[in-house]
Image (cartoon, rainbow, N blue to C red):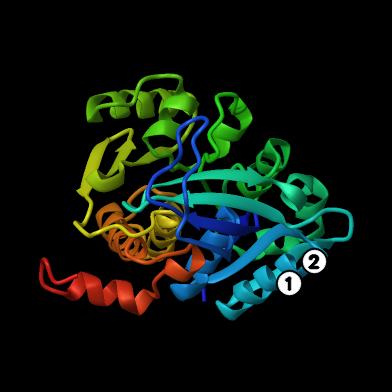
Amino acid sequence: MKKILVVGSINMDCVIRLPRRPRPGETVFCSTVSHVPGGKGANQAYALGRMGTGVSLIGAVGQDEFGRISLANLRAAGVDTTGVRVSADEDTGRAFIEVEDDGQNSIIVLGGANTHVTEQDLLAHEALFDRCEALIMQLETPLDTVTAAARLARRKGKLVLLDPAPARPDLPAELLQCVDLLKPNETELEIVSGLPADTREQCIAAARSLLDRGVGQVLVTLGARGSLLVTRDGELFVPARKVKAVDTTAAGDCFNAAFACRLERCTDASGEPAGSLAGANYREALEFATAAAAIAVTRPGAQSSIPSRDEVERSLAAPAGAD
């Protein structure tokens, strides 16, 4: 079985469902409050496990009930958690998620143990880098750690995928030059590139500015419109599937994992596993990821919304409009 390594955050999500977000100075009633495992790193690792890919996770949780629940949930999905450090000094990270009736959300994160994942955690589990074929990261752990992980993976000849969320404008050149695939949404693309990204043409221009800074390829998710892959050879657009969204919390994480899951199975022209993104079957990977995210948004929660590989493949095989 092929292996993907995730370096990233592990949170316990406090999900608050409400008809709409309050305006400043306003009080509104919510309908439900629930606690569910989340965190961008954990969500992506969980999704890879659900989709049948061998996956390991490097991160940190607190020595608390939220940490125990999070680890148990990951292990149940087949995630190797030997790289997760349990800290007696920091609490497990928390995310407070407001979900409106239309499925849109806003998120506030308390980093907790995630903010103390260091290069030493990476070096303590360097064997996981040796065994993986691709590395997936986000920006909910310290930027120095993310850069160190990218540097280590690149030195070992691994594929490096970065989800630049939460987005920041100061990503170092060394990090960008190690990234084979950058996967922002429109807002994140605007922040990372420093250029507007309101239209498809603007997204392409902003993505190309990142290619000029050393990124291999840029995959922009456009919400309900679809996704746009920008490479040095051109662009590929795949429309989103039309579904009624219930909760979009983990849609991006599900999309990322599903894309990586299918992409890492692609081969080059010789039939050998692709060592880079050159020659990979982009459309197949994007359509698989699009179908996975479409299922996820129809379900509440983060990890609980993520479909299995079989569910995604059945959705792809179903007649149009039968989802």
Q: Position of residue 77 (x, y in %)?
A: 55, 77
Q: Quadrant of the C terminus?
A: bottom left
Q: Position of residue 273 (x, y in %)?
A: 43, 63
In the figure, 183 relative to 284: above or below?
Answer: above
Q: Position of residue 90 (x, y in %)?
A: 83, 53
Residue that label 2 marks = 64
Residue occupying image coordinates x 74% and y 45%:
115
* Disc 2: CA contacts within 10 A as few (<14), some (14-19) or many (>=20): some
Is any part of residue 133 visible from this angle?
no
Kind of element beneath mark 2: loop
Q: Distance from label 2 to label 1 (Cα)?
A: 6 Å
Asked if residue 94 lies left or right of residue 33, the reply is right
Q: Quadrant of residue 35?
A: bottom right
Residue type of the residue flagged with mark 1: Arg
Q: Nearer the viewer, residue 81 or 124?
A: 81
Q: Nearer the viewer, residue 158 or 7?
A: 7
* Disc 1: CA contacts within 10 A as few (<14), some (14-19) or many (>=20): some
Is any part of residue 187 visible from this angle?
yes
Residue at the right extreme?
Answer: 89
Asked if the residue at tag 1 contacts the one at tag 2, i.e. Cβ–Cβ closer than 8 Å, the answer is yes
Residue that label 1 marks = 68
